[in-house]
Amino acid sequence: MPSLVVHLALAGLLAAALLGEELDARALAVVFVVTTIPDLDVFAGFVIAGGHRSVLHNVWIPLLAAGLLWYDTRVRASSFVVGRWGLRGVAVSWAAIVAYVVAGIGLDLLYGVNPLYPIHDEFYRLTGELLYSTEQGIVQTFVDLNDTQGPSASEVGHVSSGVDPSQGAEPATVDRTFPVAKAGWELFLTLTSAVVVALRLVGNRRGS
């Protein structure tokens, strides 16, 4: 799976794009904190088989958050978010929810997540290709209707991480690895995000 650094890199790009001139260090911190939440289910793996990439990697959490935010800002006579943080708070809240879905869950979908857990217990993985062939026309292998059902949380079992490298008791000398970038595209994304976010923050500060 992508490292937390890579998740935050994509979240930073999303924040810069969605918030524009509203982006500052505090707004970026909110987006970063929310993006980190899905990976906290690594601790669920200690007590629930396959809990990592299931418990907090499901779509129900951001859907509930989006529903509550919509109700608060569109239906309630007096919005709590607007009253406390103004319209800027609404924008940051929506950006954080998008980051949760795209940067928090979406990146892990490349390696397998359980997005409908616990209502439907099945891991999905976004893998395949989309191309145009002069002989076959448009070809895509992302969706295979004849594919067998993916594994459940219990079938996936333990998911190795720096927090929980192996299943069961571990020796005191166990190697805990916390990667920054495990592929060239991850490093490229991280560096690009750092430059873009820094330029946006500096530009916004000068314009204020």
Image (spheres, helix red, strand yellow):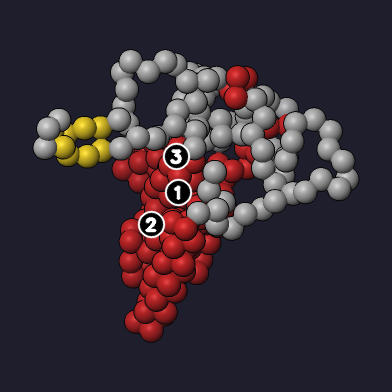
Q: Looking at the image, which residue is at 63% across and 29% down?
A: 51
Q: Quadrant of residue 15?
A: bottom left
- Under mark 3, the amino acid is Leu
- Under mark 2, the amino acid is Leu
From mark 3 to mark 1, how far is it between C-alphas?
11 Å
From mark 1 to mark 2, how far is it between C-alphas?
8 Å
* Label 3 Cα crowd, 10 Å radius (few <14 / some 14-19 / many 20+): some
Sequence-first tag of 3 and 1:
1
Camera-nearest residue between 187 and 60: 187
Do labels 3 and 2 touch, CB within 8 Å?
no
Q: Looking at the image, which residue is at 39% across and 35% down?
A: 127
Do labels 1 and 2 touch, CB within 8 Å?
yes
- Under mark 1, the amino acid is Ala
Camera-nearest residue between 103 and 147: 147
Q: Which residue is mark 3?
A: 110
Q: Is residue 99 visible?
A: yes
Q: Looking at the image, which residue is at 41% across and 45% down?
A: 102
The C terminus - image quarter? bottom left
Q: Which residue is mark 2?
A: 14
Above or below, comparing residue 143 to residue 178 in the picture: above
- x, y percent for residue 45: 68, 32
Residue 103 disc label: 1
Sequence-first tag of 3 and 2:
2
Instruction: Assign a secondary structure to mark 1.
Output: helix
